[in-house]
Image (cartoon, rainbow, N blue to C red):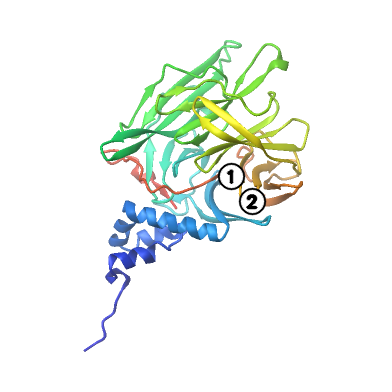
Amino acid sequence: MGESTVTMSDLPRDVLEEVLSRVPLKSLRSVRSTCKKWNTLMKDETFRKKHIADQEKSAAEKDEFLAIMVMDFRVYLTSVSLDNFDTSINQLAKLISLNDANHQVDISRVFHCDGLLLCVTEDMDSRLVVWDPYSGQTRWIEQPRSSSYCFYDRYALGYEMEKKKNGSLRRHKILRLLDVYDTSRVGVPIRECEIYSLKSSSWKVLRETPTCYIHFNQRGVSLKGNTYWCGELEPADILHWRSFLVCFDFTTERFGPHMNLPFHATYDDTLAFSRVREEQLAVLLQRRGTLRVEIWVTTKIEPKDVSWSKLFLEVDTMGPLSNAVSFFIDQKKEVAVAFDKNNFLPISINVAYIMGNNGYHKKLDLGESREDNCWPLACCYVPSSVQMEQPARRSKRKRNQIVY
């Protein structure tokens, strides 16, 4: 009798789950395409939870965490290690087109919420796609109403909790915000808000708009399903300019009150926000004409209330930061990493500034920037075990689906 051959597909389900749960995120696409059985298993919510937990445990043992980075209109899944300031940033995978691996999808902006990414394409149409890097699922979103100011549109991704008999369900939504001044009427703002429901696959216009100015370069940050921005009031006397925190609540679909920042900031200071896990918000300040950077962290954060802890970090950087800077912090190691572009050289360089206590700072060269209008963006990424809602009917844009 010949010897029988045991393959991976012959393994019991529990053994197969144990083996596949060790597959790194960057290899998921290859594993899913191996066979239908593996693809079905990796879509199972129980398996997703186990795999994500195993990945987080492995990353913690290596002192690493995942981040999403955008450089030169390309989106990367990145591994970041902050081991005793011996920082390394390694690209694990890149966003590509499904039907043509040689075709690159240009992405101008990315917004992260609940393991999902809302991507805005870099083309005349500024198309929207919600993408789950973990599962590879994508969902193209129909365009909102047309606007002659579409370049200034800002978008945010959030969710509301819908109560069910056996628990609650997250219903994801997209906010479109336009806040510009009419060039034909000096001093007259144009403010429009629309919201898209992934459940109903439709846009609706919101009557309520923010009672402050939110600059189109300002990057909102999602926390607990809501989005936080830096709002500004523009008094006649520039000396009384005030910046503050404002929240859009995706459950009530309204903007909250103006909330205090832990410092007074003027119109020409550099401000940026970042999420600390799913619990806190961090804010970075660099005053104009100085190299000093302050980073504060919240002790309480709600749509209508905020309180700030003591100063997390205060250190001089190696240069002035732009208004497009992004950053994240590691509270355990008391380190912050800021991503920006160095435009003071003959060529533009994407850089990362590592900042720590006792005045420690270090600059990492991330390579030449080939796109003048694209600043590097980075945010921490935590996969979600909850799959995104898909429309009942198959999207006509399936041919444009993008994956890792």
Q: Residue at x 41, y 20 (%)?
A: 206
Residues packed near mark 1 inside 10 Å, few (<14), some (14 to 19) or many (20 plus): some
Numbered tag placed on residue 333 in the rendering? 2
Q: Amino acid at mark 1?
A: Asp
Report how far apart the C-alphas of labels 2 and 1 lie in the structure. 30 Å
Measured as percent of width and height from the top left, residue 393 is found at 26, 39
- x and y, in percent, of residue 308 in the image: 61, 32
Q: Residue at x 28, y 60 (%)?
A: 36
Measuring 64% from the left and 38% from the top, which residue is drawn there? 325
User: Could you tell me which secondary element the residue under label 2 belongs to?
Assistant: loop
Query: Looking at numbered disc 2 in the image, what kind of residue is underneath it?
Result: Lys
Residue furthest left as drawn = 1
Say above or below: 84 vs 251: below
Q: Which residue is mark 1?
A: 72
Exactly how many numbered labels are in the figure? 2
Indicate which label's residue lies in the foreground, 2 or 1.
2
Percent across and percent down for residue 208 are 44, 17
Numbered disc 1: secondary structure = loop
